[in-house]
Each structure stands twice: as C-alpha cells, then as structure tokens.
Image (cartoon, grey):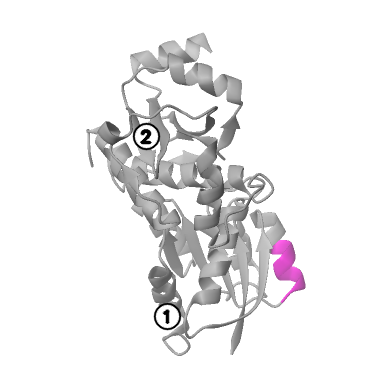
Amino acid sequence: MAYNILIVDDSTTTRAIVARTLAILPGVEIGQVFQASNGLEALDLLDKNWVDIVFADINMPVMDGMAMVEEMVKRQDMEKIPVIIVSTEGSQTRMEDLFRMGVRGYIRKPFTVEKVGQVLCDILGGNDVR
Amino acid sequence: MSDDIPQVLMEVASRVFETSAFMAVFPPEEADLPYDNAVKAASISFSGLEAGRLILALSPEILPSLVASMLGIEEAEDCEANGGEDALLEVLNIICGNVLTEIFGRDPIFDLQPPTLIEPNDAQAMLSSLPNEHRVAFAVENTRAELILRLANRPWARQLSNDE
C-alpha cells in the first residue's frame, strides 16, 4: 500500500528534509506527497485530497499545528487521519496536551531516519515498515 | 536542566549541525577565525517561563554546503535560490527549541516566533555591541559561527533593548 503524505511546516527546508527522509525509508511505499506552509493551507489540501498521514510542525504563522489538529478532530472526514508532530518542541506538558487532542506521534528536531521509521512503525502497526 | 549556558549553546549547536547537516562543529578555542567578508545572521524570539532571543551568526560561505547537506543534494552554486537563508532560519529554530529544553527542563511551555534574518549591516553592528555573556563562538567546518542568547530578565539584556 502506498501512503499519501501531507507535510505541514513553514520551513521549505524542513518540508524537503521530511520528504527526502520518507523517500529513503526502507519498507514504506510513499504515494503522493503534499506540502503546506501552515495549518490553514493544510486543511484546504485535506479537503481536496486523500491523505493517509500528516506530518506537522507546531509553531507556524497563520494557523499553528495545535489549531490545525483541533480543527481536524472536529471534522468527521479528517478526525481519523494520523498526525505526527515534527517540532523543536521539548515541553512534556505541551506534548501531553497534543496527545490528548489526538496526535499519534512525535518526532523532535533534529531527527534521524531511524526515528521517523520507528514512529511510523508504531502508527502503522509494523505492517508496512521494516 | 543546566545553568552553564555557553556549554549548553555549544552542545546543542554540535548536535544540531551534526544531526541535521552532518557538519562537524569545533569548540571555541579552535574557532579563532574571522568572518570571511560578511556575516549572515538570524534571530528568533521566544516567550514563556522566560522571554528572550537567540541569535545565530554564520559566515555566508558555509550556506551552500549547509543547504546541500541538509537536503542531501549537490552543492548549489546559487544557494539563495535553493534555500540558503531558509536553512539558516531552520537551524536556528531547531537550536532554540533544544537550548530552551536543556536550560529550563521539559515542563515549561515556550512559544517560539518565526525566526527572521538580520540585515547584514545590522548584524555586524549587533555582533560588535553584544556582551560576551551567554555567547559562544565555534567553527562549523572551517568557518566562524556564533550563538548569542539574550534573556529578557537579565539587566544587560534590558539595557540593550532600551538602546535599540
């Protein structure tokens, strides 16, 4: 199964790094990769496209990652899409808030390919990631 | 949690450059290098348990290698068109988040503003005017870099804010 991915980050560099990391991750077939620079753009892309997993930053202009997740969980067509936070955020308190809101995974920057693989494996149940 | 801020700045810079860009960072005593012709600097503001700013200054010569290493591409001749400045801003963003956790621990929540570039002329003036407290110089590969942390509740930082 090929997974369609949405990467949400205001840094084009980070979006490119996440996309490249996913492309070289063994055992995961990546389909389309969509990119958005803030939560609002992401919601618009989610409205118009089939997305299997969202990788999102927290601190972004216009709409941040927390507001985006809040909006996603309100909407039936988006509430079950797994969201993985990719952030410099180190606060345990904020991460607990995010997990309570429904976020499924957390990758702290700077990250390694192995860390991305491990978080994806946890979310996909180990079925598709070796 | 650490009170030795220069040590934290150095350790986090090493970790971020090495993990994100596979670039070696050398300690201050090996970094007695001038900036080549100019300096590229960026600043990020944060608020929360403490408010302040973190500034990262680099030699512009390192930016093409930084972009290439971060993105896993051939070194770009025109790094501006290929995100040299965006790479600098992102490295600063990553360093800032990690520095705050190292200094203040994992309980407090900090809000980080989007990092911004400092105009080259302003950067030179700022670097010469800032005090040495909470400031480290280091070498990324063979070029000079500096990190300066300004915490708003420190008297010298308030003085600088008044001067700006």
Name the residue carrying label 2. Answer: B49
Which mark's residue is nearer the viewer, 1 or 2? 1
Label 1 – label 2 distance at C-alpha: 35 Å
Along the line of sight, the residue nearer the viewer: A55 or B13: B13
* Image: magenta residue range: A43-49
State the SS at label 2.
loop
Of the 4 image quadrants, the one containing the C terminus of chain B is top right
* Dot 2: chain letter: B
Which percent across, then down, holds residue A85? Answer: 49, 61
Q: Amino acid at mark 2?
A: Leu
Going 66% across and 44% down the picture, which residue do you hit?
B80
In the image: residue B7, left or right of residue A82? left
Residue A47 lies in the magenta-colored region: yes
Determine the residue positioned at 54% across, 64% down: A18
The residue pinned by badge 1 equals: A121
State the mark number for residue B13: none
Residue A82 at x, y percent in the picture: 54, 73
Is the stretch drawn in magenta largely helix, strand or loop? helix
Chain label for disc 1:
A
Q: Position of residue A98 (x, y in %)?
A: 46, 59
Instruction: Give the camera-side residue of B21 and B62.
Output: B62
Q: Is residue A56 visible?
A: no
- Position above or below: A5 against B12: below
Q: Residue at x 40, y 78 (%)?
A: A122
Q: At which x and y percent is residue A6?
A: 63, 68
Evaluate whether label 1 is on the same chain as label 2. Answer: no
Can residue A50 be seen?
A: yes
